[in-house]
């Protein structure tokens, strides 16, 4: 009798050891995945056995029960997290379980471009299918409410950057990330600003930076443009910048700024009104914010597009120099039209 019991125990031990070897081999062997990987959506409330069955039906996982048994043994069967996952080629069942338990979900991206307006931002939010839309009003009112801004004009208050997020993240959450980032960048820049600037608040710095952002796309010119605008504010000259006029025209602007539009008075027409416009006109990047708070001291009061047509500008200290630069630019346009 004792001999039989010993034999039975030996058989069970051999079977258990064989099962352990089989499970270990299964856990560490790459799953059957395409070379491009596999996207897995785990809904809220899905259990590991149900997920394993789905993967088995898709031909990805050979022994779902073995994965469930192992997960129960190590206390992870109820720890998987919902979300969208990118499962890379070569992933093992053990690696899959770890990824699900850690919640390493697939990240999507939204890039906010320097110089965009909030209208551009709202359009990009709507077009991104990974974002859950919760802000029915994607105009100024809706964006302002999303980040709890006073008033209804959120222009300028969202920092241009690339934001990564899991599928199902709300537009409100992304707006709050971008707004929080802008607040941090603006506050830090304002605290380190150059002395003696004719700017009364960080918001006025944001307005000026938004104009700099629209006037030049060249980093080397931003401080020069800011210097011109700052000196004009100091001397009481009108800023006379086309981008502010264009912003005030809204959807009426079709690409060609006419003389009639230049003299039409709006709150944003810096040809007809002195000082800064009432709000920013774009979403400025950090380089433009720093330039607005650290302008150059060259003495230039004017600038015009360069005859090189490379996006650069010619800066002048006097009106006479500026008129010469304007004539050269107009001559270059006529020459290129031949």
Image (spheres, grey):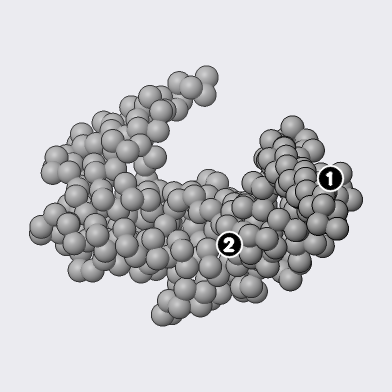
Query: Which callout, 1 or 2, points to the residue nearer the camera?
Result: 1
Q: Relative to 56, is 101 on the left or the right?
A: left
- How far from the left and from the top, in percent, is residue 209? 32, 54
Q: Which badge, 1 or 2, comes first in the chain's sequence? A: 1
191 is higher (above) or lower (below) than 139: above
Q: Is residue 331 left or right of residue 323?
A: right
**How many numbered circles does the render carry?**
2
- Can you give x and y, in whole percent of width and height, for residue 265 in the image? 41, 65
Name the residue rendered at 20%, 68% in the picture.
200
The residues tagged by marks 1 and 2 sit, at their Cα atoms, a distance apart of 45 Å
Give 99 or 330, whichever is nearer the viewer.
99
Which element carries disc 2, helix, strand or loop?
A: helix
Label 2, residues with CA under 10 Å away: few <14, some 14-19, many ≥20: some
Q: Position of residue 262 (x, y in %)?
A: 42, 54
Which image quadrant for residue 72?
A: bottom right
On the image, numbered disc 2 is attached to which residue? 122
Image coordinates of residue 108 in percent, x first then y, are 60, 51
Which of the two residues, 222 or 272, is positioned nearer the viewer here? 222
Q: Quadrant of residue 59?
A: top right
Most foreground residue, 168 or 117: 168
One can see residue 250 in this view? no
- Which mark, by number, is residue 62? 1
Residue drawn at the location 71% of the way across and 56% of the way down: 70
Q: Any mark on residue 88, and which?
A: none
Residue 327 visible at all:
yes
Please determine whether, in this image, residue 195 is positioned above or below residue 87. Answer: below
Callout 1: 10 Å neighbours few (<14), some, many (20+)?
some
Question: Which quarter of the figure is the N terminus placed in?
Answer: bottom right
């Amino acid at each position: 009798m004792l001999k039989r019991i010993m034999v039975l125990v030996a058989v069970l031990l051999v079977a258990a050891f064989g099962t352990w070897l089989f499970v270990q081999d299964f856990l560490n062997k790459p799953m059957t995945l395409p070379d491009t990987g596999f996207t897995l959506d785990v809904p809220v409330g899905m259990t590991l056995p149900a997920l394993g069955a789905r993967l088995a039906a898709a031909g990805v996982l050979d022994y779902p029960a073995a994965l469930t048994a192992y997960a129960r043994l190590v206390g992870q069967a109820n720890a998987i997290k919902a979300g969208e996952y990118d499962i890379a080629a070569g992933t093992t069942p053990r690696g899959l379980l770890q990824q699900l338990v850690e919640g390493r979900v697939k990240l999507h991206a939204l890039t906010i471009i320097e110089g965009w307006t909030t209208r551009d931002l709202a359009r990009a939010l709507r077009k991104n299918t990974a974002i859950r839309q919760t802000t029915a009003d994607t105009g100024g009112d809706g964006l302002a409410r999303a980040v709890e801004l006073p008033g209804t004009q959120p222009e300028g208050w969202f920092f241009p950057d690339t934001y990564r997020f899991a599928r199902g993240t709300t537009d409100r959450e992304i707006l709050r990330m971008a707004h929080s980032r802008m607040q941090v960048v603006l506050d830090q820049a304002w605290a380190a600003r150059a002395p003696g600037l004719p700017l009364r608040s960080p918001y006025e710095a944001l307005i000026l930076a938004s104009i700099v952002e629209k006037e030049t796309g060249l980093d080397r010119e931003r401080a020069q443009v800011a210097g011109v605008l700052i000196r004009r504010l100091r001397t009481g000259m009108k800023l006379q910048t086309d981008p502010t006029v264009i912003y005030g025209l809204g959807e009426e602007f079709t690409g060609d700024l006419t003389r009639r539009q230049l003299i039409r008075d709006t709150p944003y027409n810096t040809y007809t009104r002195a000082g800064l416009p009432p709000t920013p006109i774009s979403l400025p990047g950090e380089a433009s914010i720093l330039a607005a708070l650290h302008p150059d001291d060259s003495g230039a009061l004017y600038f015009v597009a360069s005859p090189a047509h490379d996006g650069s500008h010619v800066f002048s200290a006097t009106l006479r120099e500026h008129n010469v630069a304007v004539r050269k630019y107009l001559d270059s346009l006529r020459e290129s039209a031949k």
